[in-house]
Image (spheres, rainbow, N blue to C red):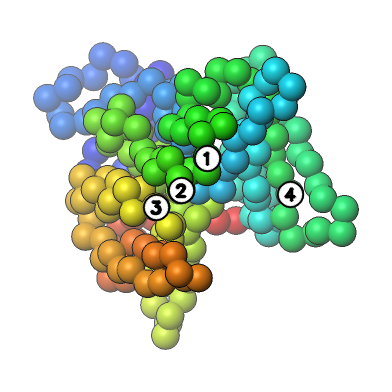
Amino acid sequence: MVYAIDSKSIEATREGSSPSSGIMYADPEKVALAYIVGVALGDGNLSKVSRAIRLRITCDTKYSGVSEEIQKNLKMILPNNRISIVRVPGKNTFHNISIYSNKLSELMPWKVGLGTKYAQKARVPDWIKCNTVYMSACLRGLIQTDGSIYEDRGYRMINFTNQTQELIEDVAEMSKCLGLRPMVSKTMDLRRPKYTVRFARKLEVEKLIALIGLHKR
């Protein structure tokens, strides 16, 4: 099976279907990696521990479904590596998902030892932006970690907030490629700029949720 996407939904489609239908195909392992790249760009941290590279992803304990999805996709891209849930004593609002692998230096869009993601201007890799299935998976990971789904005066809205302008540009670009019309704004937060991509129109919000399979639960 390969994954495919059309203008309405993401679905599993048998390999060999006609490319003239407008459906784009993708490798399931790369779909999983695109999702993890989005998650890591949102709430991930890379560090060197002894001789291994560690990816730590921080999860809100309210969203057990998101935590399970992250672990499932990590298992797809690194099937032979142990995934650990690390809880901080006295901290009940979050837990960390941890995995060690030197392959992470090639898989993640920033490097260990060269500064923070912000300093390195970490952004979405080009291979993701060339395929709508990968873009959808990456956007889901980004919004599940550094985004929110909320109600404002009875209307459901979605936003993604980050301090890296280049990443915000990528999120806006991918959204437009999926037929959406994001709104981008900039504010100052502790002398640093903070950028937000927002979806406020009812049809846009519904379309984004359906198109990328978005949830926070």
The residue that label 4 is drawn on is: 95
Q: Which amino acid type corresponds to the residue marked 3 in the rendered image?
A: Thr
Q: Position of residue 198 (x, y in %)?
A: 34, 65
Which callout, 4 or 1, points to the residue nearer the camera?
1
**N-terminal of the two: label 4 or label 3?**
4
- The residue where tag 2 is placed is 118
Tell me the amino acid under the disc marked 4: His
- Label 2 to label 4, Cα distance in Å? 22 Å
Image spot of residue 104 (x, y percent): 55, 24
Q: Is residue 171 visible?
A: no
Give the mark nearest the N terminus, 3 or 2: 2
Which one is in front in this view, the residue at disc 1 or the one at disc 3? 1
The CA distance from mark 4 to mark 3 is 24 Å
Please report contact status of discs 3 and 2: CB closer than 8 Å, yes or no.
yes
Q: Position of residue 217 (x, y in %)?
A: 60, 56
In the rendered structure, the answer to whether residue 135 lies left or right of residue 58 reads left
Give x and y (percent) for residue 55.
62, 33
Q: Quadrant of residue 135?
A: top left
Rendered image: mark on residue 164? 3
Q: Residue furthest bottom?
A: 153
Q: CA distance from mark 4 to mark 1?
A: 24 Å
Query: Is 88 positioned to the left or the right of 179 in the image?
Result: right
**Mark toward the viewer: 2 or 1:** 1
Question: In terms of sequence position, does the residue under pointer 1 or pointer 3 come before the other?
Answer: 1
Please say if 21 is above or below 205.
above
Report the quarter where the N terminus lies: top left
Could you tell whether 49 is left or right of 140 in the image? right
> Which residue in the structure is indicated by mark 1?
115
Q: Earlier in the sequence, mark 2 or mark 4?
A: 4
| CB contact under 8 Å: marks 2 and 1 | yes
